[in-house]
Image (cartoon, grey):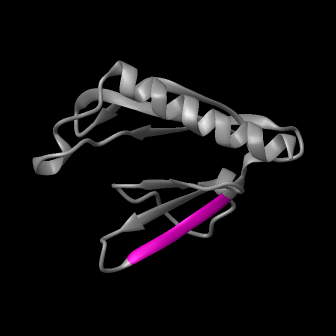
Amino acid sequence: MRALRTDVPFVPVGLTLLADDTGFEVWCGSAEHPVRLGRAPWERVADIRVTRVTRLGRATGGITVTMLDGADETGVELPFAVLGSGLGGLAVPDGPELEHLVCALRARRAASVDA
């Protein structure tokens, strides 16, 4: 959470990654009471890749966003499990869907950085 420059004293369970043309935000909390944890511009994102993430003791498909943190630009990895549809998000996206998601996020980052 330090890489997002947030003041929260702990990392909550259940994060939501939200991306737009200028960067991405990390949110938590319920739909009724969302809490914005932090925002990072695309310039601070070094890499986005498909990965396996452990969630509630089970490995599932996800993505990892590598952020550049601090003056020395140390890479900090932020893993996100990608939930699917159905009860509790159990219908998790498969490999090709995750690759498509990563390609879309990389394209958004490239368009922002190149602009």
Q: Looking at the image, which residue sits at the far right?
A: 71
Q: Quadrant of the N terminus?
A: bottom right
Quarter where residue 109 is shown: top right
Is 54 rendered above or below residue 29?
above
Q: Nearer the viewer, residue 10 or 67?
A: 67
Q: Looking at the image, which residue sits at the far top?
A: 95
Is 23 rendered above or below residue 7?
above
Would residue 64 be found to the left or right of residue 32 on screen?
Answer: right
Q: From which residue to which does the magenta span run?
A: 34-39
Residue 62 included in the magenta stretch of the image: no
Which residue is located at x 82 percent, y 43 percent?
A: 113
Is 80 rendered above or below residue 17?
above
Q: Nearer the viewer, residue 109 or 90?
A: 109
Which residue is located at x 41 percent, y 64 percent?
A: 28
**Number of numbered labels in the structure image:** 0
Which residue is located at x 65 percent, y 61 percent?
A: 39
Q: Position of residue 57 (x, y in %)?
A: 22, 33
Can residue 68 be seen here? The reply is no
Would residue 18 be found to the left or right of residue 31 on screen?
Answer: right
Can residue 50 be seen here? The reply is yes
Which residue is located at x 34 percent, y 55 percent?
A: 14
Q: Position of residue 103 (x, y in %)?
A: 56, 29
Quarter where residue 47 is shown: top right
Q: Position of residue 60 (x, y in %)?
A: 29, 28
